[in-house]
Amino acid sequence: MGRLRVIEALFRYPGTGRVEVARITGLSRATVSTLVDDLVKSGVAVESDALTEDRAPSSGRPPVLLSLAPGAAYAIGLDFGHEHVRVAICDLSGNEIVDEWSAAEVDWGPSHSFDLAHSLVSRAIERSGVCRERLLGVGMGLAAPINGITGELFADGILPGWRGVSPVQEMERRLGIPVRLENDANMGALGERKFGAALGANHLIYIRLSDGVGAGLILDGKPYTGAGGLAGEFGHVTVVSEGLICRCGNRGCLETVAGSTAVARLLERSTGQPTDVHRMLAMVRAGDRGAIRAVGDAGRAVGQAVAVLVNMLNPELLVVGGELSAAGEALLTPLREAIRLHAVAPSAAMVRVVAGTLGDRAEVLGGAAMLLDQAPEVLAHQLAASSAA
């Protein structure tokens, strides 16, 4: 337990001296010194001198600072989008060392998608030179509701070919590495908090506006997924009582008016020209009034719906990710205005609304972040097993 406390301290506060580690952990300085020596000897921790610009060369030996070694452990993120599979490997410091991507028809082809993911992961491991013994596992995301207790995937209407599929078992069988499954919006929230626009935020809502619409919640510094892991199905809030029938079977869901594909189809009907999401975004950048209006209306719908969450959860930050976030202020300005109009004034004034900075890498990096958070416990267990042997 002492070893775990020291590793956790170095994980949360890299570049910390031994005295400060003792204060954080509540362990004696002698115990910390012994444990740190063992961690350095095993390659889990590294020491460095605290050099500063105002320190004179003759002022004595600089204090020694401690951090976990970046190569002590690695995590793999694996993201299944509707039309792609993406893999990233990050070291313990969060540095992305490999990124592999491939187009794929994921919705109807789970077996092919798993085989492709296996190939991408294997190639990424080979390219990185990472020893498999140092892999914490795979954080895998899917664009569908997931029961966090049973791992059951609710694929109907969302991933039509995936009914009855067990994604974790399929990938673990292929890879021989532990796999943890999460909804893609939840992974996006983790990615932006660890690596992107939400660094340090403890009360965060991440809204993913792509073909589907979802929310990832970070409350009091921890992911919130609800009793069964299904929290955040924000895209299936009814916003138009007599609206279009949604793929979930309900009518007038937010996804039918603010999903990126839905907005592009609306623009296509009005222009009479074939319009996909990429063309719509190009039209927004070119200043096309119709495209700007379509995206702005989607932003207003999202803002009015998210105002309920702002009232209930009082977040400090709302990060907008997914394909539609590339529309920038054409989307964000109407969204902010809708929150101002529909949320109570103190909460509306407190929440800051920004676009994500990770783009289409948010989910895959979130998968890696999910595993990195488990690193202290895994490393402590490995060292304990090694000592016992």
Image (cartoon, helix red, strand yellow):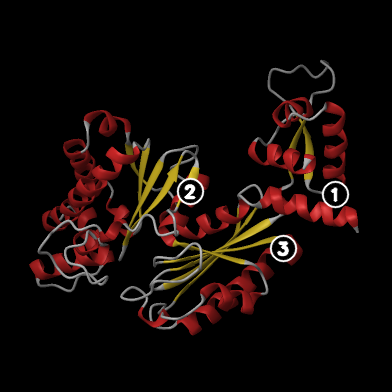
- Quarter of the image with the N terminus is top right
- Res 174 → quadrant: bottom right
- Res 308 → quadrant: top left
Please tell me which of labels 2 and 1 falls first in the chain.
1
Work out whether 369 lies above or below 167: above
Task: Give the amino acid type for the residue marked by disc 1 in the picture.
Answer: Ser
Task: Single out the mark in the foreground, 2 or 3.
Answer: 2
Q: What is the number of the mark on residue 223?
A: 2
Q: Position of residue 288 (x, y in %)?
A: 15, 56
Work out whether 235 lies above or below 204: below
Q: Secondary structure at mark 3?
A: loop
Question: Are there few (<14), some (14-19), or many (20+) residues within 10 Å of tag 2?
Answer: some
Which residue is nearer to you in this view: 69 or 291? 69
Query: In the visual, does 288 lie left or right of 277?
Result: left
Q: Position of residue 22 (x, y in %)?
A: 76, 28
The residue under the point 67% across, 41% down is 11
Q: Secondary structure at mark 2?
A: strand
Question: Are there few (<14), some (14-19), or many (20+) residues within 10 Å of tag 1?
Answer: few
- Res 341 → quadrant: top left
Q: Which residue is mark 3?
A: 130
- Quarter of the image with the C terminus is bottom right
Q: Which residue is mark 1?
A: 42
Q: Position of residue 209 (x, y in %)?
A: 31, 57
Q: Are marks 2 and 1 in contact (CB under 8 Å)?
A: no
Query: In the visual, does 269 lie left or right of 200?
Result: left
